[in-house]
Image: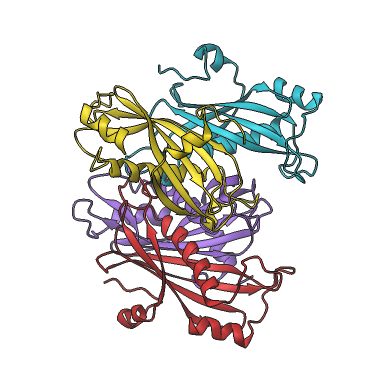
Chain colours: A purple, B yellow, C cyan, D red
Amino acid sequence: MRKVNYIENMEQWRSEFKFYIPVKVRFSETDMYGHVNNVSPFIYFEEARIDYIQHTGLMTDMVSKDGAVIVGDLQCDYLQQIYFNEKLKLYVKTDSVGNSSFDLHYMGVKENDEIAFTGRGRMVYINPQTGRPQPLSEEKKRLLVEN
Amino acid sequence: MRKVNYIENMEQWRSEFKFYIPVKVRFSETDMYGHVNNVSPFIYFEEARIDYIQHTGLMTDMVSKDGAVIVGDLQCDYLQQIYFNEKLKLYVKTDSVGNSSFDLHYMGVKENDEIAFTGRGRMVYINPQTGRPQPLSEEKKRLLVEN
Amino acid sequence: MRKVNYIENMEQWRSEFKFYIPVKVRFSETDMYGHVNNVSPFIYFEEARIDYIQHTGLMTDMVSKDGAVIVGDLQCDYLQQIYFNEKLKLYVKTDSVGNSSFDLHYMGVKENDEIAFTGRGRMVYINPQTGRPQPLSEEKKRLLVEN
Amino acid sequence: MRKVNYIENMEQWRSEFKFYIPVKVRFSETDMYGHVNNVSPFIYFEEARIDYIQHTGLMTDMVSKDGAVIVGDLQCDYLQQIYFNEKLKLYVKTDSVGNSSFDLHYMGVKENDEIAFTGRGRMVYINPQTGRPQPLSEEKKRLLVEN
């Protein structure tokens, strides 16, 4: 399997995921190459990310006045083609937590248990009024690490 | 050419369009059938519609406090397949104006001047506070009819 | 409720639906107006339509050599705003069957049982080699009518 | 400006771009946060990438029998919010060329000349029959480096 620069040991990395959402590939997500367009995993990442963040309890509302999380960067490594009607499990986990940001990792798994793509991205915790980063409380950090 | 129920005379109907925007078909807008996905014309309609409404002067801002236009219904008739990288002209015109609504018609034309798809949809002029339809002034009706 | 020109009696029309797929509204399907973009119901229609056609047994494979179904036209009537994270039931039924085409009707229902949008569109049964319409067998017509 | 791990010197990096395509932000590309959805830059990357590859002369046809380029990975760093109707310049350049792959870098620039987002991704040159990587000829490498 190809080397991905944010994954040191693929088996260990994979074993650390617990949370996932199901994704069924839509016809409109394919392209003329006959498989899923490269843009689509980022759509799936977003859906999984929001569900995961609500699952952790970090935020009960994505538009809270106290704090908001925005995406700093995103990346995806494409390991296998995906086809129309495939059912994927889209896993998300917190890989690391900083002072006012945290890194989420993503893994898209096929029905045959093979990994179709992996991904990561930094989330930034901001003050919605100023748009500036603000510190994550210890409680919020704990919620991310434990979920 | 196939009959479309909102077009009585295709040549006359076509000749009444003046305003258009250019559209270049994106790779991500194709699907595994090898041509443009059926959803994409509605993306083009929206882009053309907003540009057209600003062109008429009906609204200078799509989020004005005085009035907003929302989509009541939309339809598209697919006449020919469209392929990646094609350049289309997306025409829009006001077909009819009512008390608090108006009908826009759409036409997507290929580089060889053939019509790829046609469409129509009713726009409703509402009060943004109440969400209820409100009358179009004579001046606004005139802007729509003349453009 | 607003009048929709392909629905004579809303209650009867609604009662005739049996087949549906679940749809959960994605964040990327909203727009800056704060609710679901007008394009999104057509994405849902496509997903529901393909599942429905496979459910009827009309086609076991969307790319069969014997026959293919293509979309002749599509329309959507927007009855209520839909918001991020809403769970919809997307119903599909065959409304009428012609010689080489059939009309599908669509209904998007909210968790509170209210109808968010309705739709319809003509499907054409074609010969994949020639691209021309071809007759639906009596067996195929029966599958559509009964499902 | 925030540090991006594939950019050593932002001014030099920026000065090396020559090729770009214009992008006008569509309403359907915004989301309920009021600005462009995080998925959209990847749509723009794809459009710019294909135009750029055709511009270099590396491939005259994206579905050639001799060779095809596929996306190995993609990433985007979001530096500023982008709003509906903004006009961007989407720049692409070849950053480095390997034996059977090459790295493209991306830059999205606003009308006020500020950078909205940056990106990169590895492209792999494959044999379309086998799906396996194959060497880029010296001529092809030259086309990439010089354009």
Q: For residue D91, which quarter of the picture? A: bottom left
Residue at 19 percent across and 35 percent down: it is B65
> Residue B58, percent across and down?
25, 37
> Residue A94, percent across and down?
43, 58
Residue at 51 percent across and 76 percent down: it is D103
> Residue C3, percent across and down?
44, 17
Relative depth, front residue between C81 and A128? C81
Residue at 30 percent across and 36 percent down: it is B146
C122 left or right of B52 in image: right
Please identify the quadrant where the N terminus of chain D is shown: bottom left
Relative depth, front residue between B40 and D134? B40
Q: Is residue D143 visible?
A: yes
> Residue C76, percent across and down?
48, 30
B49 left or right of C92 in image: left
Please say if A81 is above or below C14.
below
Q: How many marks?
A: 0
Q: Is residue A8 visible?
A: no
Please say if C27 is above or below A36.
above
D5 left or right of A28 in image: left
